[in-house]
């Protein structure tokens, strides 16, 4: 049901036909994100993501919004460290209007000076919002310290200084050099026929010219340990993010890492949730997660607690990591985690939006599609011994990094005390 085709101008098309649904989700993906930006224009990818909705040669910003609303289209976009996506979900009968609108906004933004300055203020407010969101702020602080001096450590949205200094000419030049078939792919999933979608895309995107530029190359980062703090006395809690180097997106051990992360802090029955919340009542929320990129990644544990309880939460977290490294997980824990992973995956793929995103990410990172059966088989092959091996690989001699935001008070910690 998955078809792949390259148009004459080099633009890649992927479609998946899903019977018995009425919706189609289509995304225009740019294989470029914030890590591909020069330091002086940090945040330009995210700024451009905003600007393409602010008017084209054919439509004003209001007309873009009205075109989407007329057919009940869900139109949105997002920027990450490694890619940017513009997507729309619509009933199958309105797919043609959807393709026409997406083709217009990603090819012909007007960069009207008045709209540009207005949207600059919107982005600056978005950047300031991070200061009022401790969960986002602690993540940005951790990334900046963990990947110090590397593009992966810079915030996706940029800074007030970089966004404030971007000229219209610089934005137009970056757009021209980035938004071309060489760096794009279009992915659609849902109630569709591949041939019909391909015809629409030839009409809508066939005029784009290849620039033979390929994907921007970047150097791998070197992770750094250390502790970074930000005092926010107006907060009632201390927000903590502990992280250590893990695997890149395509690493062979990624499935064992997924299982390890799930049993560590990915579910209500996980070790961290049970030990720190259920048994001790120290937090409302504690969880672990994996951030994986094309050439690096990290395992993180996030929690928020009373300032006087921060040290205890950290000690309990480090104890669980050491226990997993030294004694490993039980087969029962591994089995529960595997069942949870497989269920989450299968349930997520009931959405055409998720199916579209899954197709795109696999193409971006692997250049091919892994079938659901193959992924489930790879998860099933993980056992307690493999989880233990991966945990030792991550934790042996590891020196995690830590970010803390909130009322620091008496929260004192030396870097050596984080060593595993």
Image (tube, rainbow, N blue to C red):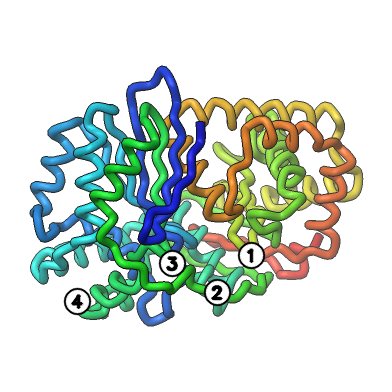
Q: Nearer the viewer, residue 157 or 274?
A: 157
**Residue on which disc 4 sits:** 168
Quadrant position of residue 209: bottom left
Q: Which one is earlier in the sequence, the residue at label 4 or at label 2?
A: 4
Q: Secondary structure at mark 4?
A: helix
On residue 34, the disc is: 3
Residue 338 shows in the view: yes
Any part of residue 233 in sight: no
Classify mark 3: residues with Cα within 10 Å, few (<14), some (14-19) or many (20+): many
Give the Cα distance between marks 3 and 4.
Answer: 19 Å
The image shows residue 151, relative to residue 78, as above or below, that is below
Of callouts 3 and 4, the N-terminal one: 3
Q: Are marks 1 and 3 in contact (CB under 8 Å)?
A: no
Determine which of the numbered discs, if any, sits on residue 218 in the image.
2
Q: Earlier in the sequence, mark 1 or mark 3?
A: 3
Looking at marks 1 and 2 on the same chain, the residue that comes earlier in the sequence is marked by: 2
Q: Secondary structure at mark 1?
A: loop
The one nearer the camera, 228 or 21, is 21
Q: State the CA–CA distance, disc 1 to disc 3.
A: 15 Å
Say whether disc 2 or disc 3 marks the residue closer to the N-terminus.
Answer: 3
Residue 67 appears left or right of 308:
left
From the top left corner, tell me how far across and down residue 225 is, in percent: 68, 70
Between marks 4 and 2, how big is the CA–CA gap?
26 Å
Tell me, for residue 295, which label it has, or none: 1
Label 2 element class: loop
What residue sits 32% from the left and 57% below the top? 129
């Amino acid at each position: 049901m998955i078809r792949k085709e390259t148009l004459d101008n080099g633009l890649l098309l992927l479609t998946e036909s899903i019977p018995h649904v009425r919706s189609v989700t289509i995304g225009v993906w740019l294989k470029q994100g914030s890590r591909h930006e020069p330091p002086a224009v940090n945040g330009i990818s995210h700024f451009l993501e905003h600007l393409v909705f602010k008017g084209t040669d054919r439509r004003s910003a209001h007309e873009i919004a009205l075109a989407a609303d007329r057919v009940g289209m869900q139109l949105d976009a997002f920027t990450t460290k490694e890619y940017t996506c513009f997507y729309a979900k619509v009933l199958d009968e309105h797919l043609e209007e959807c393709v026409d609108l997406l083709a217009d906004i990603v090819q012909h933004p007007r960069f009207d000076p008045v709209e540009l300055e207005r949207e600059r203020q919107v982005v600056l407010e978005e950047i300031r919002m991070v200061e009022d969101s401790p969960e986002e702020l602690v993540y940005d602080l951790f990334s900046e310290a963990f990947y110090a001096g590397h593009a992966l450590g810079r915030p996706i949205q940029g800074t007030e200084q970089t966004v404030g200094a971007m000229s219209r000419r610089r934005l137009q030049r970056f757009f021209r050099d980035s938004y071309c078939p060489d760096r794009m792919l279009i992915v659609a999933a849902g109630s569709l026929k591949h041939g019909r979608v391909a015809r629409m895309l030839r009409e809508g995107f066939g005029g784009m010219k290849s620039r033979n530029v390929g994907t921007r190359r970047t150097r791998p980062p070197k992770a750094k340990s250390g502790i970074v703090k930000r005092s926010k006395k107006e907060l009632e809690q201390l927000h903590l993010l502990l992280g250590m180097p893990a695997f890149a997106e395509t690493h062979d051990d990624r499935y064992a890492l997924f299982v390890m992360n799930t049993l560590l802090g990915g579910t209500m029955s996980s070790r961290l949730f049970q030990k720190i919340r259920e048994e001790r009542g120290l937090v409302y929320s504690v969880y672990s997660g994996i951030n994986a990129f094309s050439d690096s990644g990290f395992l993180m544990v996030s929690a928020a607690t009373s300032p006087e309880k921060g040290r205890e939460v950290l000690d309990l977290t480090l104890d669980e990591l050491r226990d997993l490294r030294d004694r490993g997980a039980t087969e029962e824990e591994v089995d529960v985690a595997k069942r949870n992973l497989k269920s989450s995956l299968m349930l997520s793929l009931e959405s055409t939006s998720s199916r579209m995103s899954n197709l795109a990410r696999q193409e971006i990172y692997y250049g091919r599609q892994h079938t659901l059966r193959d992924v489930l088989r790879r998860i099933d092959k993980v056992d307690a011994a493999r989880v233990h091996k991966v945990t030792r690989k991550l934790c042996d001699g590891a020196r995690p990094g830590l970010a803390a935001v909130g009322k620091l008070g008496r929260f004192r910690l030396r870097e050596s005390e984080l060593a595993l």
